Image: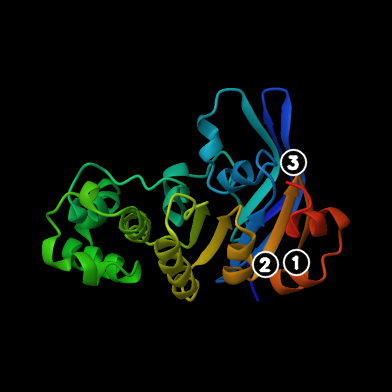
Amino acid sequence: MNTKMQTKNLNFYYSKTCALNNINLDIKERYITALIGPSGCGKSTFLRTLNRMNDIIPGARISGEVILDNRNIYDKCVDVVDLRKRVGMVFQQPNPFAKSIYENVAFGPRMLGMKRFVNLDEVVEKSLRAAALWNEVSGDLKKSALTLSGGQQQRLCIARVLAVEPEVILMDEPCSALDPIATLKIEELMQELKKNYTIVIVTHNMQQAARVSDFTGFFLLGEMLEYGDTNEMFSRPKNKKTEDYITGRFG
């Protein structure tokens, strides 16, 4: 079981406010890690540190390390564009571009200059297939992505991430805006994707965390109070606060 990413003594500040305090976490390669905890506990902030999405926030600063394949992603020589290609992000609300289905998926390879080395038609089909969407849209790739259902839009956004060949996929509450049927499709998709990708998901849904993840980290007030095997954490949590949160006694 290899470690794909690792945080060491990670602290994050919004100006003078400490949002993350001394987070040490190993993210295992080709497994699903879920981050749980009440709203405002730091889990989404932590997720965004993994591909430097917080860099654009005025006054934000970080200390400690985030290691990807033995290299600190916060080293000055790291190419952030390349990093975000390797560590892709799927957001809470589906955010397809106001373009065709085809152009949504082809967008990343075009922007990164990959079209010089790959067949875009093949990339689009492969990505849509990997996102379990090809059979539903293959007959009309010129159709606007905005006409798709919410669940289809979210799978399209996943396909858009896959098109640039990432190694890690970050998902920030990817099912919170979806109905139960669409949620099930995304969860089934995650199980397929982990065969080839490392996945980190933020979720408020305890049942979802228990269903889809291999490892779980419980965040509270900017600290990670507990981390371990999901089945063990949900059946025998070591921390009383973890138990209270999982059983619905607070949060």
Q: In the shown orientation, is residue 9 left or right of residue 78?
A: right
Can I make out residue 217 in this image? yes
Of label 1 and label 3, which has the lower sequence position?
3
User: Observer-nearest residue: 105 or 72?
Assistant: 105
Cα distance between the residues tagged 1 and 2: 5 Å
Residue found at x 23% / y 61%: 117
Q: Secondary structure at mark 3?
A: loop
Q: Position of residue 132 (x, y in %)?
A: 33, 70
Binning the other alpha carbons within 10 Å of mark 2 as few (below 14), some (14 to 19) or many (20 upward) gives many
Disc 1: which residue: 228
Residue found at x 67% / y 23%: 15
Identity, as a three-letter code, of the amino acid under mark 2: Phe
Tag 1 and tag 3, C-beta contact below 8 Å: no
Q: Secondary structure at mark 2?
A: strand
Cα distance between the residues tagged 1 and 3: 18 Å
Identity, as a three-letter code, of the amino acid under mark 1: Gly
Disc 2: which residue: 215
Residue 222 marker: 3
Identity, as a three-letter code, of the amino acid under mark 3: Gly
Q: Is residue 244 depicted above or below 198 in this figure?
A: above
Cα distance between the residues tagged 2 and 3: 19 Å
